[in-house]
Image (tube, rainbow, N blue to C red):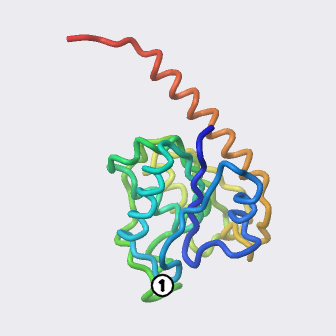
Amino acid sequence: MNEVLILPGLFGSAEGHWQRHWLQDHTDSRCVIQDDWDHPHVDQWLFRLESALEEAGEAYLVAHSLGCLLAARLAGRSVARRVKGALLVAPCDLPVTEVLHPGQISFGDMPTAPLPFPSIVVGSMNDAYMTVDRLALFGRLWNAETRNIGLAGHINIASGFGRWRNGYRLLEALKTRSGARKRAVSMLPAFSM
Protein backbone atom coordinates (compact mmCIF):
# COMPACT_ATOMS: atom_id res chain seq x y z
CA MET A 1 0.00 0.00 0.00
CA ASN A 2 1.30 3.44 -0.94
CA GLU A 3 0.87 6.36 1.38
CA VAL A 4 -1.20 9.38 0.35
CA LEU A 5 0.18 12.79 1.29
CA ILE A 6 -2.44 15.53 1.64
CA LEU A 7 -1.23 18.99 0.58
CA PRO A 8 -3.56 21.80 1.72
CA GLY A 9 -3.31 25.30 0.34
CA LEU A 10 -3.27 28.76 1.87
CA PHE A 11 -4.67 28.74 5.44
CA GLY A 12 -4.61 24.92 5.52
CA SER A 13 -7.80 22.91 5.20
CA ALA A 14 -10.31 23.89 7.88
CA GLU A 15 -12.55 21.44 9.72
CA GLY A 16 -15.16 20.14 7.27
CA HIS A 17 -12.94 20.56 4.19
CA TRP A 18 -12.88 17.52 1.91
CA GLN A 19 -9.15 17.03 2.66
CA ARG A 20 -9.96 16.71 6.38
CA HIS A 21 -12.61 14.10 5.57
CA TRP A 22 -10.05 12.33 3.38
CA LEU A 23 -7.69 12.03 6.34
CA GLN A 24 -10.50 10.59 8.48
CA ASP A 25 -11.67 8.14 5.80
CA HIS A 26 -8.28 6.85 4.62
CA THR A 27 -5.84 5.40 7.14
CA ASP A 28 -3.09 5.40 4.50
CA SER A 29 -3.13 9.22 4.29
CA ARG A 30 -1.47 11.97 6.29
CA CYS A 31 -1.25 15.72 5.99
CA VAL A 32 2.03 17.45 5.19
CA ILE A 33 2.03 20.03 7.99
CA GLN A 34 3.48 23.46 7.25
CA ASP A 35 4.89 25.84 9.86
CA ASP A 36 2.94 28.82 8.53
CA TRP A 37 -0.32 28.21 6.68
CA ASP A 38 -1.13 31.94 6.54
CA HIS A 39 2.13 33.20 4.98
CA PRO A 40 3.42 30.40 2.74
CA HIS A 41 7.02 30.52 1.58
CA VAL A 42 7.86 28.16 -1.26
CA ASP A 43 11.24 27.01 0.08
CA GLN A 44 9.85 26.19 3.53
CA TRP A 45 6.83 24.38 2.10
CA LEU A 46 9.02 22.44 -0.35
CA PHE A 47 11.32 21.36 2.46
CA ARG A 48 8.35 19.93 4.38
CA LEU A 49 7.02 18.12 1.31
CA GLU A 50 10.41 16.69 0.34
CA SER A 51 10.98 15.51 3.92
CA ALA A 52 7.58 13.79 3.94
CA LEU A 53 8.36 12.07 0.62
CA GLU A 54 11.74 10.89 1.88
CA GLU A 55 10.04 9.47 4.96
CA ALA A 56 7.23 7.82 2.97
CA GLY A 57 9.50 6.26 0.35
CA GLU A 58 6.80 6.52 -2.32
CA ALA A 59 3.47 8.32 -2.15
CA TYR A 60 0.52 9.72 -4.02
CA LEU A 61 -0.18 13.43 -3.58
CA VAL A 62 -3.67 14.86 -3.08
CA ALA A 63 -3.37 18.64 -3.28
CA HIS A 64 -5.73 21.59 -3.13
CA SER A 65 -5.23 25.16 -4.36
CA LEU A 66 -1.73 26.40 -3.46
CA GLY A 67 -0.87 22.80 -2.53
CA CYS A 68 -1.18 21.99 -6.25
CA LEU A 69 1.52 24.53 -7.06
CA LEU A 70 3.67 23.00 -4.34
CA ALA A 71 3.28 19.58 -5.98
CA ALA A 72 4.07 21.07 -9.40
CA ARG A 73 7.30 22.54 -7.96
CA LEU A 74 8.62 18.98 -7.66
CA ALA A 75 9.19 18.81 -11.43
CA GLY A 76 12.94 18.63 -12.01
CA ARG A 77 13.74 17.75 -8.40
CA SER A 78 15.23 14.37 -7.54
CA VAL A 79 12.55 13.60 -4.95
CA ALA A 80 9.91 13.62 -7.73
CA ARG A 81 10.82 9.99 -8.44
CA ARG A 82 9.09 9.12 -5.16
CA VAL A 83 5.73 10.49 -6.36
CA LYS A 84 3.49 7.73 -7.77
CA GLY A 85 0.91 10.24 -8.98
CA ALA A 86 -0.83 13.50 -8.07
CA LEU A 87 -4.45 14.55 -7.82
CA LEU A 88 -4.35 18.34 -8.15
CA VAL A 89 -7.69 19.86 -7.15
CA ALA A 90 -8.58 23.50 -7.86
CA PRO A 91 -5.05 24.75 -8.49
CA CYS A 92 -4.79 28.47 -7.94
CA ASP A 93 -3.37 30.89 -10.47
CA LEU A 94 -0.57 32.54 -8.51
CA PRO A 95 -0.98 36.11 -9.87
CA VAL A 96 -4.72 36.00 -9.05
CA THR A 97 -4.06 34.56 -5.60
CA GLU A 98 -1.49 37.27 -4.87
CA VAL A 99 -4.09 39.93 -5.74
CA LEU A 100 -6.75 38.27 -3.59
CA HIS A 101 -4.32 37.87 -0.67
CA PRO A 102 -1.76 40.70 -0.99
CA GLY A 103 1.51 40.35 0.88
CA GLN A 104 0.77 36.86 2.19
CA ILE A 105 2.37 34.55 -0.36
CA SER A 106 6.05 34.10 -1.30
CA PHE A 107 5.77 31.39 -3.92
CA GLY A 108 7.74 32.76 -6.89
CA ASP A 109 6.38 32.23 -10.39
CA MET A 110 3.74 29.77 -11.58
CA PRO A 111 5.38 26.37 -12.13
CA THR A 112 5.16 25.42 -15.81
CA ALA A 113 7.42 22.36 -16.22
CA PRO A 114 5.84 19.04 -17.21
CA LEU A 115 5.26 16.79 -14.22
CA PRO A 116 7.31 13.57 -14.27
CA PHE A 117 4.52 11.59 -12.60
CA PRO A 118 0.93 10.79 -13.65
CA SER A 119 -1.43 13.60 -12.69
CA ILE A 120 -5.06 14.60 -12.84
CA VAL A 121 -5.93 18.30 -12.56
CA VAL A 122 -9.49 18.97 -11.39
CA GLY A 123 -11.06 22.40 -11.73
CA SER A 124 -14.34 24.17 -12.24
CA MET A 125 -15.98 26.71 -14.50
CA ASN A 126 -16.42 29.34 -11.78
CA ASP A 127 -13.31 29.21 -9.61
CA ALA A 128 -12.31 32.71 -8.47
CA TYR A 129 -8.69 31.52 -8.26
CA MET A 130 -8.29 30.00 -11.76
CA THR A 131 -10.13 30.63 -15.03
CA VAL A 132 -11.17 27.70 -17.21
CA ASP A 133 -8.70 28.77 -19.92
CA ARG A 134 -5.81 28.95 -17.46
CA LEU A 135 -6.84 25.59 -15.98
CA ALA A 136 -6.61 24.02 -19.44
CA LEU A 137 -3.27 25.75 -20.08
CA PHE A 138 -1.66 24.48 -16.88
CA GLY A 139 -3.10 21.03 -17.42
CA ARG A 140 -1.29 20.94 -20.78
CA LEU A 141 1.93 22.45 -19.41
CA TRP A 142 2.00 19.96 -16.54
CA ASN A 143 1.22 17.09 -18.95
CA ALA A 144 -1.77 16.20 -16.78
CA GLU A 145 -5.24 14.91 -17.54
CA THR A 146 -7.64 17.80 -16.91
CA ARG A 147 -11.17 17.39 -15.55
CA ASN A 148 -13.61 20.29 -15.41
CA ILE A 149 -16.39 19.40 -12.96
CA GLY A 150 -18.69 22.29 -13.86
CA LEU A 151 -19.97 24.95 -11.47
CA ALA A 152 -18.03 23.90 -8.38
CA GLY A 153 -16.28 27.10 -7.32
CA HIS A 154 -12.92 26.54 -5.63
CA ILE A 155 -13.92 22.98 -4.65
CA ASN A 156 -13.84 23.84 -0.96
CA ILE A 157 -16.18 24.28 1.99
CA ALA A 158 -17.52 27.61 0.65
CA SER A 159 -18.64 25.88 -2.55
CA GLY A 160 -20.30 23.02 -0.70
CA PHE A 161 -17.56 20.40 -0.69
CA GLY A 162 -17.31 18.41 2.50
CA ARG A 163 -16.79 14.67 2.13
CA TRP A 164 -15.99 14.31 -1.60
CA ARG A 165 -16.36 10.70 -2.72
CA ASN A 166 -15.76 11.59 -6.37
CA GLY A 167 -12.29 12.67 -5.30
CA TYR A 168 -11.70 9.18 -3.88
CA ARG A 169 -12.70 7.70 -7.25
CA LEU A 170 -10.38 10.06 -9.10
CA LEU A 171 -7.44 8.93 -6.98
CA GLU A 172 -8.33 5.29 -7.64
CA ALA A 173 -8.35 6.03 -11.39
CA LEU A 174 -4.96 7.70 -11.02
CA LYS A 175 -3.59 4.70 -9.12
CA THR A 176 -4.81 2.37 -11.87
CA ARG A 177 -3.16 4.53 -14.52
CA SER A 178 0.05 4.78 -12.50
CA GLY A 179 0.13 0.99 -12.04
CA ALA A 180 -0.40 0.41 -15.77
CA ARG A 181 2.40 2.86 -16.56
CA LYS A 182 4.76 1.09 -14.14
CA ARG A 183 3.93 -2.31 -15.67
CA ALA A 184 4.53 -0.98 -19.19
CA VAL A 185 7.91 0.45 -18.21
CA SER A 186 8.95 -2.78 -16.48
CA MET A 187 8.09 -4.75 -19.63
CA LEU A 188 10.47 -2.72 -21.80
CA PRO A 189 13.43 -4.83 -22.90
CA ALA A 190 16.75 -4.10 -21.26
CA PHE A 191 19.56 -3.34 -23.65
CA SER A 192 23.21 -3.64 -22.81
CA MET A 193 25.97 -1.76 -24.48
Q: Is residue 135 left or right of residue 113?
A: right
Image quadrant occupied by the N terminus: top right
Q: Identify which amino acid the numbered label 1 is placed on.
A: Val
- Which SS class for mark 1? helix
Measured as percent of width and height from the top left, residue 148 is found at 66, 55
Residue at 57% x, 45% y is 145
Measured as percent of width and height from the top left, residue 184 is found at 50, 21
Measured as percent of width and height from the top left, residue 183 is found at 53, 22
With respect to residue 2, does 46 lie above or below?
below
**Which quarter of the figure has residue 191?**
top left
- Total count of labels: 1
Q: Is residue 95 left or right of residue 92?
A: left
Q: Is residue 48 left or right of residue 43?
A: right
* Residue annotated with mark 1: 99
Image quadrant occupied by the C terminus: top left
With respect to residue 98, does 117 lie above or below?
above
The answer, for residue 124, to whether it is visible in the render is yes
Measured as percent of width and height from the top left, residue 8 is found at 58, 67
Residue closer to the observer: 119 or 55: 55
Residue at 47% x, 43% y is 57
Residue closer to the observer: 77 or 98: 77
Residue with the most extreme front position: 55
The answer, for residue 132, to whether it is visible in the render is no
